[in-house]
Image (cartoon, grey):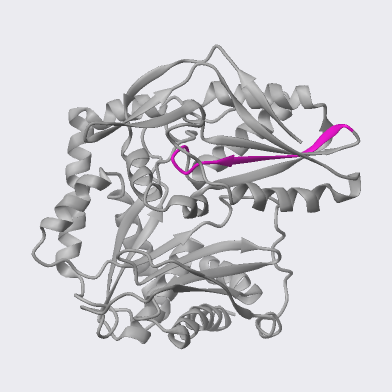
Amino acid sequence: MESEFAFAGARPGTGPATWGQSAIWDVVRRLGADAARYNVSGGTPLDPPLPLDRLAGVVRALLLRHDSLRTVLAPDGERLAQVVHAAGAVPVHARECEPADVTETAYALYHELQAIPFDAERELPVRVGVVVADGLAGYVILSLSHTASDGWGLRNLLADCAALLAGREPSGDARQQPLEEAAYQASERGRRRDAAARRAWIDKLRRGPASQFPDRAGRPAAPAFPNAVLNSPALALALDRVATGLAVNQGAVLLAAAAAAAGRLGGAPDTVFQIVVNNRFLPGMAGAVNTIAQEGLLHLPGTTGDFAALVRRTFGAALSAQRHAYYDKLALDRDIADLRAACDHSCFVNDTRGLMPILGYAKPPAEPLHRARARTTLTWPLEHAPRRNTTFALDAQDAPGSLELAMTADAAVLPRPDMERFLFGIEDLVVTQALALQ
């Protein structure tokens, strides 16, 4: 059952695209049908269930509040423009089921919507999924093009949705809409920030190792990039314990373990990762729904020795990477192309835990780590097309009662046995440190 939710009376506008919009546009336009894997989607159960017209009113309020949901992108010479619509409609994908099947149906619809690519030039970047039981909406799913939002923006959108469903006004600060953000980026202050961030990147790129894994230079990419998924309840438990014991965040622990595991595998003295960070630090941006997150460059000299000390160093290095993660990516790409020699920056880490919720996965139950570790699994779900300038991409993501590390890698550089050693190495480092802190 397909329909639409119409809206009118919103603020229109046209202007240059933001750095984030341009960066994602540049990625997804090369991917074609595979661009759907960049969608950001989440949802929430409706308790009590709602009439569809009430849900339509909530969705309209979200569309009026966040310009990015009404924005299409259009090439404008050598640049990209954003066009914000004042009126229009977004598609609604409804699925009917029995009341007992609402959650299961929502999960299936989530994956269905997640697999449909967006045309950022011709359609608004949001789709609504609704699960209907006994004539009432029992679950709503919001599926967005990555050109409209990143994971942190989706989290803001779902928080606004929850407030409206409860009859409250959203409390997040979302004054910095994409048009205002683009204006800031074109200002003198914005240009200074961009220049400083790109200088910091170039400095790190000059200091890192030329190759992090043996014989990478000149080797053609594999015809397909395998995808491995480590599902580890023990890693989820151990991350929490190590972060608490060392007074850092879980992300620093995970990054340190990935850096040490990569160092063991490749033998390079330093580790360099591109890490995706939330850079909503400008006034009015904390509650924004937009694509703002970008890669920061993490450079860790020396990853051997005491793991606890490496975690603490990683925490500081990650803050430095975040500080310099707001920039014009297309300009940075030109800077890197002009470098005589840049270090290997082909490894990517993205921690998406908590950013694209759908079923509110429960945390793993408290239990001895050796017992939880016995339930670790490694699977090889699929293969991806080759990715340009990528040795591996590692995603940390939520799973029911667990944590998953999903890794896609160039098999010409990291064959499957190396991928396996890398993923189990991360688990071993964190679990061993958790046991040492007991």
- Which is nearer the eye, 17 or 178? 17
In the image, what residue occupies the spot 44% across and 75% down? Answer: 257
Asked if the stretch drawn in magenta spans residue 146, the answer is yes
In the displayed structure image, the side of residue 310 where residue 45 appears, left or right: right
Name the outermost residue toward the left.
340
Q: Position of residue 282 (x, y in %)?
A: 36, 34
Whether residue 397 is in magenta: the answer is: no
Residue span colored magenta: 135-148
Q: Quadrant of the C terminus?
A: bottom right
Establish if 358 lies above or below 7.
below
* Residue at the (29%, 86%) spot, across then down: 267
* Residue 53: percent from left, percent from top: 77, 22
| Secondary structure predominantly adopted by residues drawn in magenta | strand
- Tell me which residue sits at (20%, 45%) in the image: 331
- Within the image, what quadrant is residue 274 found in? bottom left
Instruction: Give the residue at the far top of this rendering.
Output: 9
Does 127 appear above or below 335? above
Indicate the quadrant where residue 285 lies.
Answer: top left
Q: Position of residue 244 (x, y in %)?
A: 54, 66
Can residue 59 be seen in this snapshot?
yes
Decide if residue 169 is in sight here: no
The residue at 51%/30% (across/down) is: 69
Q: Is residue 156 left or right of residue 358?
A: left
Whole-percent x, y for residue 280 in the image: 41, 40
Residue 405 against residue 64 in the figure, above or below: below
From the viewer's perspective, is residue 193 above or below residue 107? above
